[in-house]
């Protein structure tokens, strides 16, 4: 999935992650907050699962590694920030398209009613067919971006958006694992596997192959043309100065900003298209109604 549309779950998870981080930071042991000593390095995973936090395999790896490295509090706070940022981003996207979608539903309802009353079959057919075609087109486009070839990435606006969205989880997981004490060579394949877009993931895999052979991360990503030039520049500076962890954080923050702006642009474009369709459909329904009404009056008068 390119975008996760579960802001409520992300917000609840962020609160639980922050709460556990606060407890540990205050000096409470995992056992004192409900943990089981028998869980060993997975004690944080068990605690959070028990509090209703959904964790994937990478989240669990980050938590286990951070506990082993003595960086549990920092990792919990980072994961909470990621969930919170994702929730804000999702709510912003949903808010951008909610009003136009409501207009479409209302316009379709009015068109179907008018078409039924005035016996204009073409109106409800058009009212139902156009939104259905639009939804089908969006599904095909998203699947193409996710699983298709490089041609899909050349689609205006959407292709650049998909590339940034694909790079975001790669940077999130690479930074999370590396900052939790996982060696780069071990963390990188995990981050590559999380990339949701096939074309980008293949480029990252090519970069990982070079990285595992002993090449620097910057050089590997450059040769494979796997990430945005801005990301490449930031990671190159981090490697040269010996501060890759901070460079990953900077690159992650920058990609988040870019994704949010491009998503807002995309949602705005979809919203304007939906609004235009709703207005045209409503106008057609009203025009059809009054045309039929006046025709009926004329027949009655004669």
Image: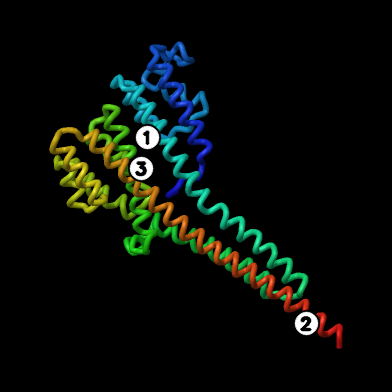
Residue 250 in the image, given as x and y percentages of width and height: 27, 39
Element at label 3? helix
In screen coordinates, is 251 left or right of 159? left
229 lies above or below 30: below
Instruction: Measure how far apart labels 2 and 1 are at the Cα level.
Output: 67 Å
* Residue identifier under label 2: 295
In this view, the mark in front (2 or 3)? 2
Outermost bottom residue: 302
Q: Which numbered mark, 1 or 3, is in the foreground of this view?
A: 3
> Are circles 1 and 3 on residues that touch, CB within 8 Å?
no
Circle 2 Cα neighbour tier, 10 Å, few/some/many (<14 / 14–19 / ≥20): few
Mark 1 and mark 3 lie on one chain; the one further toward the N terminus is 1
Closer to the camera, 211 or 157?
Answer: 157
Of the two numbered discs 2 and 1 in the rendering, the one whose residue sits closer to the viewer: 2
Residue position for label 3: 169
Query: What residue lies at 67% left-to-right and 75% top-to-bottom?
Result: 122
User: Can you tell which quarter of the image residue 123 is in?
Assistant: bottom right
Front position in the image: 254 or 57: 254
Find residue 58 and name its label.
Answer: 1
Residue at image location 68% in from the left, 67% down from the top = 111
Q: Which residue corresponds to the image point at 43% horizontal and 35% vertical from the top-left?
A: 83
Neighbour class for label 1 at 10 Å: few (<14), some, many (≥20)? some
Q: In the figure, residue 85 lies in which quadrant?
A: top left
Q: Is residue 157 left or right of residue 134?
A: left
In the picture, the disc for residue 151 is none
Q: Are marks 2 and 1 in contact (CB under 8 Å)?
A: no
**Rendered view: 160 above or below 118:** above
Image location of residue 8, percent across then percent down? 53, 37
């Amino acid at each position: 999935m390119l975008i996760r549309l579960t802001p409520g779950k992300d917000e609840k998870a962020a609160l639980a992650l922050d709460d556990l981080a606060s407890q540990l930071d205050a000096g409470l042991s995992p056992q004192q907050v409900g943990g089981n000593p028998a869980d060993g390095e997975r004690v944080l995973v068990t605690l959070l699962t028990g509090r209703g936090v959904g964790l994937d395999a990478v989240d669990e790896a980050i938590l286990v590694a951070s506990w082993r490295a003595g960086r549990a509090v920092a990792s919990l706070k980072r994961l909470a920030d990621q969930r919170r940022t994702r929730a804000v981003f999702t709510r912003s996207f949903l808010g951008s398209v909610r009003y136009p979608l409501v207009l479409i539903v209302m316009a379709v309802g009015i068109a179907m009613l008018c078409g039924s009353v005035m016996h204009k079959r073409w109106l409800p057919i058009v009212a139902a067919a156009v939104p259905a075609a639009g939804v089908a087109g969006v599904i095909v486009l998203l699947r193409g971006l996710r699983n298709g070839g490089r041609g899909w990435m050349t689609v205006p606006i959407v292709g650049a958006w998909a590339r940034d969205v694909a790079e975001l989880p790669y940077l999130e997981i690479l930074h999370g694992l590396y900052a939790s004490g996982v060696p780069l060579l071990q963390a990188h394949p995990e981050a590559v596997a999380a990339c949701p877009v096939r074309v980008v993931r293949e480029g990252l895999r090519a970069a990982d192959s070079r990285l595992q052979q002993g090449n620097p991360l910057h050089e590997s990503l450059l040769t494979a043309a796997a990430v945005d030039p801005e990301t490449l520049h930031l990671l190159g500076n981090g490697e040269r100065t010996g501060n890759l962890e901070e460079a990953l954080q900077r690159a992650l923050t920058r990609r988040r900003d870019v994704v949010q702006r491009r998503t807002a642009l995309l949602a705005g474009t979809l919203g304007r298209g939906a609004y235009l369709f709703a207005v045209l459909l409503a106008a057609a329904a009203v025009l059809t109604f009054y045309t039929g009404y006046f025709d009926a009056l004329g027949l009655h008068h004669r």
